[in-house]
Amino acid sequence: MSEYNITHVEKTDRRALGQVKELLQVEGITLDKNLDYIAAVIDDDYNVIATGSCFGNTLRCFAVSNKHQGEGLLNLILTHLIDYQYKRGNFHLFLYTKIKTAKFFGDLGFYEIARVDDALVFMENKKDGFESYIKNLEQDKKEGKAAAIVMNANPFTNGHLYLIEKAASNCDVLHLFMVSEDASLVPFYVRKRLIKEGTAHIKNIVYHESGPYIISNATFPSYFLKDEETVVRSHAKLDIEVFKKIAKALNITERYVGEEKTSFVTSIYNEVLSSSLPEAGIQCHIIARKEIDGNAISASSVRTLLKAGDVEKIKSLVPESTYKFFSSPDAAEIIKNIQATEDVTH
């Protein structure tokens, strides 16, 4: 293989970034908006001939020029990104790839977690990573009828509480998976605290951090899927494939989700869950949102009020513990970040 240089592409470098985008487009890929490091292999004429990127502990947006196939550039860029991740303390790595390229990454040390046959494969660099995660979950297996909720709670509202109370009243044990990815305006350590404080009166809950295997909307890759509906359906299908294994480990037979009439994304997601989960022996319950004054309570409405500085107005929308937190000095930096964000509705 010829000697090539690998460089970090700054988002201000229009020439290199443009070439990265062109290279990805040939593969039917758009440059992911969620990237914190972009790498490129450069030839002697300073042209980008291979690229790959990172977001958090994930690797994404790989492409190699057709003129340089078979030169080992995918291996080169992957090795560079892994070294970069290790240097910043990320040792457990994940990637999403098309079906046709999964074998290449498998040969380079990545292991399949789950796949959606018409869209993507979800992989990690630990051979027993997901298996260990499932074994740890099995320690929380309980007797009786078990249900599950997966919740981001950005932040925790009376709507979330209503859904949890509804599910908990209809089962012996409720496994509550709190999305632990820090891709939300309210950081995970706060979301976790508010969920647990707001549900302390419900005694049949088993709390779980979702870990890296339950993927949020914020970090699910959309860059090689053709349109928004395909993205949502693929995310839901991948969620189901992972969740089926979780459900088996914990004897979960029911899953509860909140209804969302006004959200295209959530309605499609819920449609896929409700049609596919029963095929795996898991009943899916879509619960109507709790309302106040004829309006559904949502985390986005709470964030909107916080952005406007109307902390007092969230009191009717959230549990007392959530209101107390956002009324305290501890929330000042979070509210500042919310106020500095242009769109807080997503």
Image (cartoon, helix red, strand yellow):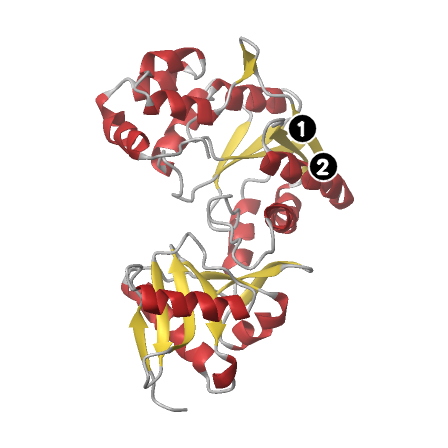
**What label does residue 286 carry, if any?**
1
| Residue 219 visible (yes or no) | yes
Residue for badge 2:
274
Name which residue lies at 40% across and 79% down. 76
- Count the numbered circles shown: 2
Q: Are marks 2 and 1 in contact (CB under 8 Å)?
A: yes
Locate residue 89, reporting x and y percent. Answer: 30, 60
Locate residue 97, reporting x and y percent. Answer: 55, 64
Amino acid at dot 1: Ile
- The residue lying toward the viewer, choosing from 326 and 310, is 310
- For the N terminus, which image quadrant? bottom left
Amino acid at dot 2: Ser
Locate residue 186, reporting x and y percent. Answer: 36, 33
Mark 2 crowdedness (10 Å alpha carbons): few <14, some 14-19, many ≥20: some
Specify the farthest residue to the left. 329
- Indicate whether 218 appears above or below 37: above
Q: CA distance from mark 2 to mark 1?
A: 8 Å
